[in-house]
């Protein structure tokens, strides 16, 4: 297995005792997948089971913490790009693609066979993100159809889906981004958030498992088709952060991150921004230690204060990241089949 490592030192704080600074080490360990797919879908079940998905109808599965990978091609989906994936264990997973009419597929046997679980012939559908709050409640979002984001929800683990009609209208030129499968956040409490970009950069929020929605403005960058909110993450029902920027001009770092302390009703600009455009933000937590990790194609940053201030740590770039639940470890995925294990110490 080919590996590469970067040892990085960054300042962080002990959660609950913020007057005692500590040093955190972050190490990227490149893993050999033998895949050439562009990977933007990633789901980490635990320290051993990791799923990834991407271009060419590709799905990857590791059951040994990334030491080896099984590459699968979903039958009939060779021209699809699976930007979104969710899994329960090494047998059960669901993927959503950006091209239809067959958008959603699920497996119950570790990818040996796949079943279409969402089919829709509506013109213009392009699913950007999929997120489950628990084993039964899920949401998926497409670019706008007839002036509203096309959001579907499930209450049976993804076997059946219904469109949500109660969303506020979008502004002209407003859209979502399928950059990292993180433009939706969905918590077990039923709270959900969807970030937007383009001509507007807003956060749509729900408090009832996606049945009804409101929308809040943010100070995030906007105005072009490649700018806005790319990712949203919440550490609990109140504290959340969004990151993004301009995909075509990643060096621009004005208004590329914001945070909330009231569940997404109001958003404030980060005081110190990430170094450049970031396509994914995720919480990392183990015991008393907690921080936010943001990554994009040109590097990564961390925040130890809920997204108010960001610290650049590396030029190592990936599209997306997921932490191992309850551990200071995670996995990142990107172009050309690249996956790395990220170890924080």
Image (tube, helix red, strand yellow):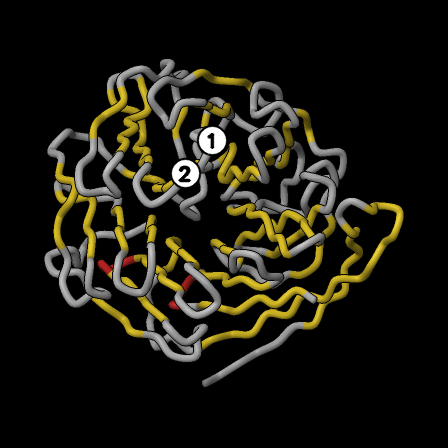
Seen at 50% across and 69% down, the residue is 340
Answer yes or no: do the residues labelled 2 and 1 have beta carbons within 8 Å?
yes
Instruction: Between residue 245 and residue 23, name the one nearer to us.
Output: 23
Mark linked to residue 225: none
Seen at 39% across and 66% down, the residue is 49
| Displayed quadrant of residue 171 | top left
The residue tagged 2 is 177
Seen at 20% across and 45% down, the residue is 104
- Residue 299 lies, with reference to residue 199, above or below; the image says below
In the displayed image of the protein, which residue is found farthest to the right?
A: 19
Number of marks in the image?
A: 2
Q: Is residue 287 left or right of residue 45?
A: right
Q: Residues within 10 Å of mark 1 (few under 14, many from 20)?
A: many
The image quadrant where one finds the C terminus is bottom right
| Displayed quadrant of residue 121 | top left
The residue tagged 1 is 195
Question: Can residue 245 be seen in the rendering of this structure?
Answer: no
Give whichever of discs 2 and 1 has the lower sequence position. 2
**Percent of width and height locating residue 304:** 73, 46
């Amino acid at each position: 297995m080919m590996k590469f490592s970067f040892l990085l030192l960054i300042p962080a704080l002990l959660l609950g005792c913020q007057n005692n600074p500590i040093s955190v080490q972050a190490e990227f360990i490149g893993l050999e997948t033998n895949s050439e797919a562009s990977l933007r879908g990633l789901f980490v079940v635990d320290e051993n089971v990791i799923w990834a998905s991407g271009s060419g109808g590709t799905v990857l599965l590791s059951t040994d913490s990334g030491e080896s990978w099984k590459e699968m091609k979903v039958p009939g989906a060779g021209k699809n790009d699976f930007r979104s994936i969710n899994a329960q264990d090494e047998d059960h997973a669901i993927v959503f693609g950006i091209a239809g009419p067959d958008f959603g597929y699920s497996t119950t046997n570790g990818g040996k066979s796949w079943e279409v679980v969402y089919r829709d012939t509506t013109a213009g559908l392009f699913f950007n993100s999929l997120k489950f709050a628990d084993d039964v409640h899920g949401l998926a979002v497409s670019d706008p159809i007839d002036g509203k984001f096309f959001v579907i929800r499930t209450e049976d683990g993804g076997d059946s889906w219904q469109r949500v009609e109660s969303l506020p209208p979008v502004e002209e030129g407003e859209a979502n981004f399928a950059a990292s499968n993180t433009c939706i956040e969905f918590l077990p409490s039923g709270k959900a958030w969807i970030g937007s970009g383009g001509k507007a950069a807003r956060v749509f929020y729900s408090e009832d498992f996606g049945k009804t929605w409101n929308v809040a403005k943010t100070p995030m960058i906007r105005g072009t088709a490649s700018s806005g909110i790319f990712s949203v993450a919440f550490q609990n029902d109140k504290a959340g952060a969004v990151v993004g920027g301009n995909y075509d001009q990643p060096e621009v770092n004005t208004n590329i991150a914001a945070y909330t302390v009231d569940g997404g009703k109001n958003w404030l600009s980060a005081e110190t921004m990430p170094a450049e455009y970031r396509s994914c933000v995720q919480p990392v937590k183990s015991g008393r230690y907690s921080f936010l990790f943001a990554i994009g194609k040109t590097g990564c940053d961390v925040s130890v204060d809920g997204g108010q201030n960001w610290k650049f740590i590396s030029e190592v770039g990936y599209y997306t990241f997921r932490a191992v639940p309850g551990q200071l470890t995670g996995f990142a995925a990107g172009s050309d089949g690249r996956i790395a294990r990220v170890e924080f110490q």
